[in-house]
Image (cartoon, helix red, strand yellow):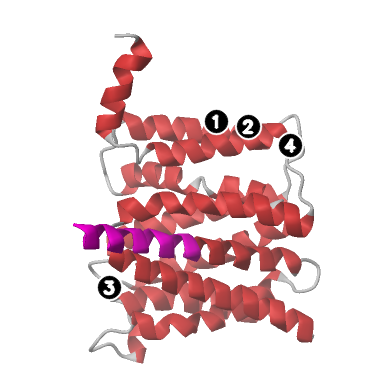
C-alpha cells in the first residue's frame, strides 16, 4: 500500500514538473516577441520535437509509419488541428499576459465535454454541464466584451483551446486504429512543413541569443512531453489531470516577475471560475453527498 502511494505521488510530482516546463517554454515565446516570427518559432519547435521520437517507438515500428496511417483523412485532420494549435498558442502568448492566455486556453477541458457529446455521442452528467456553464462564465468575466478591447491574442487563445479539444477528441476516436508513432507523425510533421513554407519568404537567421531562447522553447516543450509520458505510466489520468492547473500559478508568477504583467481583479475572478470549473469535475461524489446536507441545511 505504501509503495503504491509512493508511486502515485511520484507520478503527480513528475506531472507538476512537466507543467512547470510547459509554462517556462511558453515564457520563451513571450521573450521572443518581435524578434522571431511565429512560423520560424513553430518550425524549430516542431523539428526539435523529434527528440522524443525514441520514446514513441515500439517494437515493429518503422519510419514510414510516421506518414502511413490506416485512415488518411483523420491523419490530415490531426495534422491540421496540431498546426492551428501550435500557431494559436504562439500568437496568444506573444500578445497576452501569461495568466490571461492560460485562462482562455483552459477552456479546453470544457470544450472537450461539448465535443465529446457531439462527435463521440458520450453522455454527460449534470456536474459536467455545470462545470461547462461555470467555465464559460469565467471566460466572459476575463474577456468582458463591450467593456474592453478583444484582440488577436484573445482570439488565438480561444482557438488554441478549441483546437486542443479537437485533438483530444480525435485521439480518443482513433487511438485504437492507429499506431502511436503515426499519431505523432501527424502532430509534428504537418506543423513543421507548414511552418517551413511560411517562413521561407523573408527568412532571417536568428542570432546567438535568439537561438538560445528558441532552443529553450523547444527543449523545454520536449522535456515536458517526456515527463508527462513518464508520469502517465505511474499515475492514472484522473489523478494527473488536476495538476495542469498548476500552469495558472506559473503563468501569474512568471508573467509578473519576467514581464511585469499586471492582471486586474476581474480577470483574477474569471481565472478562479475557470479553474474551479475544471477542478469541479474531479471532486469525488462522496464529498458532494457529504456537502449537500450542509449546503441545504438538512
Q: CA distance from mark 1 to mark 2?
A: 6 Å
Q: Position of residue 125 (x, y in %)?
A: 29, 33
Q: Quadrant for the N terminus, please.
A: bottom left
Magenta-span inclusion, residue 133: no
Q: Is residue 4 magenta?
A: yes
The residues bearing labels 1 and 4 have C-alpha atoms spaced at a distance of: 17 Å
Of the numbered discs in the image, which one, if any, rests on residue 264? Answer: 4
- Label 1 crowding class (10 Å Cα cut-off): few <14, some 14-19, many 20+? some
Residue 133 percent location from the top left of the image: 46, 30
Point out which mark residue 141 bears: 2
Of the residues under marks 1 and 4, which one precedes in the sequence? 1
Q: Is residue 19 above or below residue 68?
A: above
Q: Quadrant of residue 76?
A: bottom left
> Which element carries disc 4, helix, strand or loop?
loop
Circle 1 is placed at which residue position?
137
Magenta stretch bounds: 1-18
First reached walking from the N terminus: tag 1 or tag 3:
1
Residue 87 showing in the rendered view: no
Viewer-proximal residue, 194 or 149? 149
Q: Which residue is mark 3?
A: 178
Give the Cα separation between the discs numbered 2 and 3: 40 Å
Query: Between disc 4 and disc 2, whose residue precedes?
Result: 2
Query: Does label 2 or label 3 sit earlier along the sequence?
Result: 2
Q: Is residue 95 above or below residue 31?
A: above
Amino acid at each position: 500500500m505504501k509503495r503504491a502511494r509512493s508511486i502515485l505521488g511520484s507520478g503527480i510530482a513528475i506531472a507538476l514538473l512537466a507543467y512547470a516546463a510547459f509554462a517556462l517554454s511558453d515564457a520563451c515565446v513571450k521573450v521572443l516577441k518581435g524578434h522571431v516570427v511565429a512560423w520560424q518559432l513553430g518550425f524549430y519547435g516542431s523539428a526539435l520535437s523529434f527528440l522524443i521520437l525514441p520514446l514513441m517507438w515500439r517494437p515493429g515500428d518503422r519510419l514510414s509509419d510516421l506518414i502511413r496511417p490506416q485512415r488518411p483523412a483523420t491523419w490530415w485532420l490531426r495534422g491540421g488541428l496540431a498546426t492551428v494549435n501550435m500557431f494559436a498558442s504562439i500568437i496568444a502568448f506573444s500578445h497576452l499576459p501569461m495568466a490571461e492566455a492560460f485562462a482562455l486556453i483552459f477552456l479546453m477541458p470544457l470544450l472537450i465535454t461539448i465535443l465529446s457529446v457531439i462527435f463521440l455521442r458520450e453522455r454527460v452528467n449534470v456536474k459536467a454541464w455545470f462545470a461547462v456553464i461555470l467555465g464559460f462564465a469565467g471566460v466572459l468575466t476575463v474577456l468582458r466584451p463591450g467593456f474592453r478591447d478583444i484582440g488577436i491574442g484573445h482570439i488565438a487563445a480561444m482557438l488554441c483551446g478549441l483546437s486542443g479539444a479537437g485533438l483530444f477528441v480525435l485521439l480518443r476516436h482513433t487511438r485504437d486504429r492507429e499506431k502511436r508513432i503515426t499519431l505523432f507523425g501527424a502532430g509534428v510533421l504537418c506543423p513543421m512543413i507548414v511552418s517551413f513554407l511560411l517562413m521561407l519568404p523573408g527568412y532571417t537567421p536568428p542570432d546567438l541569443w535568439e537561438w538560445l531562447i528558441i532552443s529553450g522553447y523547444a527543449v523545454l516543450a520536449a522535456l515536458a512531453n517526456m515527463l508527462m509520458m513518464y508520469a502517465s505510466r505511474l499515475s492514472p489520468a484522473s489523478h494527473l489531470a488536476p495538476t495542469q492547473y498548476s500552469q495558472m500559478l506559473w503563468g501569474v508568477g512568471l508573467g509578473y516577475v519576467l514581464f511585469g504583467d499586471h492582471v486586474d481583479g476581474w480577470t483574477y475572478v474569471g481565472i478562479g471560475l475557470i479553474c474551479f470549473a475544471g477542478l469541479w469535475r474531479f471532486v469525488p461524489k462522496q464529498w458532494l453527498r457529504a456537502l449537500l446536507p450542509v449546503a441545504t441545511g438538512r
